[in-house]
Amino acid sequence: MTTSDPPFSFDVGSRIDRLTGHLASSAVNLGPDLADAVITDILRQLCDLMGADFAALENTADDVAVPAPRRMWMRPGAALGQEPALSVRVAAAGSGPFALSIGTSSGRDGWPNSVAEALRGLAHVMVLAVLRAQQALELERIKFTLSTPVISPPVRTFDQSWDSEDFANIIGDSPALRFAIARVQEVAPTDASVMLLGETGTGKELFARAVHNRSTRRGRPFVSVNCAALPSTLIETELFGHVRGAFTGAVSMRQGRFELADGGTLFLDEIGDLPADVQAKLLRVLQEGQFERVGASQTRQVDVRIVAATHHNLEAAMKEGRFRADLYYRLNVFPITLPPLRDRLEDLPRLVWYFVNRRQRALNRKFSSIPDTVFAALRERSWPGNVRELANVIERAMIHSTGNTLVLDDVPPQRVAPLRDAGTLEEIERQYVEEALRRCRWRINGRGNAAEVLGLHPNTLRNRMKKFGIQRPKGPVPFDPGRLSA
């Protein structure tokens, strides 16, 4: 094993540290039915980071009363029986030592100590999650044995199948997607507010409908509102309704979306774009179930379950005063993060065939085959628009193709261009920060700012600018419509 830490290895170690932080933050609320799926998905991400054929977590002790089963992820087509290229061990009280093994196929002689230490920290958190899941299952077994004759409902497992009507148009079987669906299965039977987080085009409204379809409110209305599509002057009357004569043009009474969704579910898409004055009225409805139509004095009572969605960082907006903290905590009872398409590329074949079968009659086309080269080319794209972008790409390819074989058009893959003249890791970071600032016209606060693009807090970005000696140019900043390089 080498001891030097090249920039690539440093980047792998830092990404493994981020995986550790994400797993540690979610392990507390991780139920026993989700632990295996989460661990398996972590192993898959490790293989992607390190160019590995397989990754495995197993208990290496021989004298454990109830040994933990081996968790493993192997790349499709990888040869069986390979020896691991890197293995780290961690101790676990009462369960013996565990080993996290990585088998690489990239021809590397070894990984530096920093990567091994990052893997050891990740393995420690994974083992704690596994042991906690085992303890939870054991407690459930004991409680069932000692309980009264009242029979508890069975615990849903992660691999439980779902009805096509409940999850209509949610296509795929990747671990990342199944984890999100399992979260829906957990929260749907309750009346808790749900916050759907994810990039644009990841199917937030489909998941909102899935929450409604599996809830006790499925026989009642599902009403959707896009908060970003309505001007601030109309969104209040859209949500709460108005009486006749409330304002110019209000020639008749109109019910708002809350009244229409009474007894059912109200989906508030792009909740981060809600004006501040409407946020206060929305909070009152959530807390008391009461509101008044615009121009009326009569208080109305409603029973509505809220499912909200956003692609904005609401925590940052809350700290900047653009989003009410009390409303944020009221909505963010049960967050569900929807995976971007680049994290579920194994779902590409099923998604492509789904879009082909859905649109070929309308386009007067009939396709019987899709070459592997098409799927290989699709995997090379960055997919900033996610599944919505994929649907457009496939429809364009269907129009472009003339036979019964799908052929992609000549639009080049939308991959992010590499930095020019890349030097040290610090120099690469300085160039990236400076280019992000330039593309965002040196905005650090507000919508479309550079801090949001970089995933940093505005104060953290200011510290980076000071560290790298980056200063905003004097005079007006010209608009640059180009894409941010990576």
Image (cartoon, helix red, strand yellow):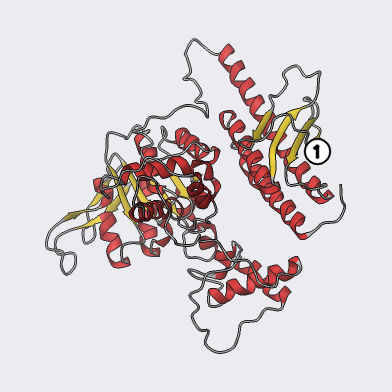
Seen in the picture, residue 320 relative to 261 is either above or below; the reply is below
Nearest to the observer: residue 55 or residue 224: 55
Amino acid under disc 1: Val
Residue 166 vertical placement versus 344 (above, below): above
Residue ID for mark 1 = 88
**Residue positioned most to the top:** 149
Q: Is residue 296 above or below residue 35?
A: below
Quarter of the view holding residue 254 = bottom left
Residue 19, percent from left and from top = 66, 47
SS under mark 1: strand
What residue lies at 70% left-to-right and 37% top-to-bottom?
55
Spot occupied by residue 26 in the image (x, y as percentages of width and height):
61, 41
Q: Of all residues shown, which one is farthest toward the left? A: 251
Q: Residue at x 46, y 39 (%)?
A: 172
Query: From this viewpoint, is residue 113 visible?
Result: yes
Asked whether 269 or 459 is in front, the reply is 269
Residue 89 horizontal side relative to residue 180, left or right: right
Quadrant placement of the C terminus: bottom right
Of 65 and 259, the residue lying toward us: 65
Relative to 5, is 164 on the left or the right?
A: left
